Amino acid sequence: MQIRLLTAEEVQRALPMSACIEAMRGAFAQLAAREVEVPLRTRLATPDGVTLFMPAYLKQSHALGQKIVSIYEQNARQGLPTISAIVILLDATTGHPKAIVDGTSLTALRTGAVSGLATALLARPESAVLTVFGAGAQAPAQIEAVLAVRPVREVRILSKSGHSARQLARRVASAHPEITVHVAEDPVRAVEDADIICTATPSRTPLFPAEAVPPGAHINAIGSFTPEMCELPLEMLADALVVVDQKEAAWAEAGELIQAREAGLLDPTSVVELGDIVLGRHRGRTSPLQVTVFKSVGLAIQDVAAADRLLARAERQGLGTLIEL
């Protein structure tokens, strides 16, 4: 039995952001059509971190697999990544494993891509100013995804230490010399005239006040993934169009939504799934002044759909290492 191993570098070579965004469009269309099997992730905690097991099957794509991802915040003290992951793809006909993919790079790519899809569906077409909170592993792909779908002219980056923000700013400026990129320090000033805001942090308190968010802004919130975390001001959600990747997962894990519901600030029936907008069942943004929020906790269908598209492209390009089991 042969299995193809794909490294982080090969993930980047084989699956460009635009192709991954289209893979996310297909995955969320299948989710909305109820053509997927995607159990809630299983969490196993150790004294030092947590490991998540995330299986999925996409019926139309015939894609089957699982991601295993570990989040160990203390790794940073040892100079190690805080997030590590692999994705295993299986043949949906035989059940045999057919690929093992670096899941850390794929997670960042698919998380960015679903934000790119949400931005394409919800952000105003003329959006030009992007503010990003967080400069860790997820942030670069968030920026690349937004740049792929909107005519951004300015990027503002904020991070807790400032050092990682400066590093990321240099990286983005080097790759996109036509864009103004700088590090911001004041959260209020950074968001008060932003068209798109991305939050990619593990914060347990809102990163900016509700009154700082300008009318018409679109927000991608992808950092929090437990009921205790909260990147966004709860009162802002009361008047915004709130879109999620999946309601079941969001109500189990999206701290902002859970806390806003408990505070009586968010009507659960008003929350929309992204796939319904993809399929045209919901119109999405209703006015240029409406604030839209995409809250994602991440679904295994994203990993499996991205890995499936990646494998097909890698095979055509002759990328990866074949091993015998």
Image (cartoon, grey):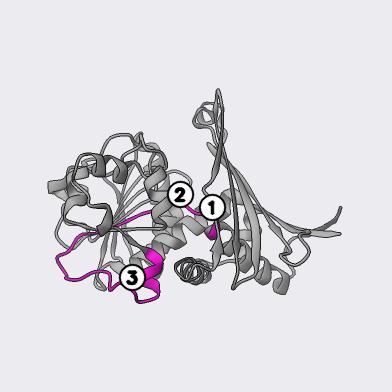
Q: Which residue is mark 2?
A: 138
Question: Is disc 1 surrounded by few (<14), some (14 to 19) or many (20+) residues within 10 Å?
Answer: many
- At mark 1, the secondary structure is helix
Tell me whether the residue at label 2 lies in contact with that at label 1, contact meaning CB atoms closer than 8 angstroms.
Answer: yes
Q: Nearer the viewer, residue 193 or 117?
A: 117
Residue type at mark 2 is Gln
Q: Nearer the viewer, residue 128 or 6?
A: 6
Q: Residue at x 67, y 71 (%)?
A: 312
Whole-angstrom CA distance, mark 3 to mark 1, is 21 Å
Which quadrant, please, contains the N terminus? bottom right
- Prevalent SS, magenta region: loop
Q: Nearer the viewer, mark 3 or mark 2?
A: 3
Residue type at mark 1 is Thr
Q: Is residue 177 visible?
A: no
Mark sitting earlier along the chain (2/1) = 1
Q: Which residue is mark 3?
A: 121
Q: Which residue is mark 1?
A: 107
- At mark 2, the secondary structure is loop
Height in image: 159 above or below 271? Answer: above
Q: Position of residue 170 (x, y in %)?
A: 40, 51
